[in-house]
Image (cartoon, grey):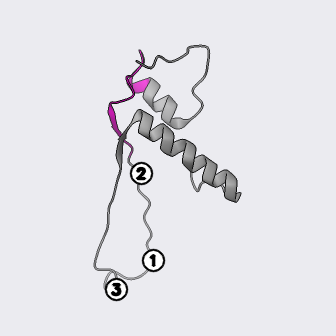
Amino acid sequence: MLEWASEQPAKTPLDRLMRSLYPRGTSGRELVAIMTAYFDASGAPADQPFVVVSGLVANYLQWKVFEDAWAAIHQRFGISPLFT
């Protein structure tokens, strides 16, 4: 069981989300789907016959690994995320 340290503030949006969903702590194995959509209106409908939607579902521990790796990539290449 992962218990949130009350004296330490949540450092990332993922941590804040998990603390609000599981205020008493979590095993880290509960599945969490995070959905974000970005749309691009370029092109014309006749030229773009398909719309593609994708997503990821992972547990908290898997999201933490992804979040840390993604932050390291941004830092390594000196880029910032599009949205934070």
Dot 1 corresponds to which residue? 42
Residue 48, quarter of picture: bottom left
Q: Position of residue 21 (x, y in %)?
A: 38, 26
As helix, strand or loop, the secondary structure at mark 1 comes to: loop
**Figure check: 68 above or below 75:** above
Q: Which mark is residue 47?
A: 3
Q: Which mark is residue 36?
A: 2
The answer to which of 16 and 73 lies nearer the viewer is: 73
Mark earlier in primary sequence (3, 1)? 1
The answer to which of 49 and 60 lies nearer the viewer is: 60
As helix, strand or loop, the secondary structure at mark 2 comes to: loop
Q: Residue 2, can we see it?
A: yes
Magenta segment: does it hold 27? yes
Mark earlier in primary sequence (2, 3)? 2
Q: Residue at x 31, y 85 (%)?
A: 46
Q: Which mark is residue 58?
A: none
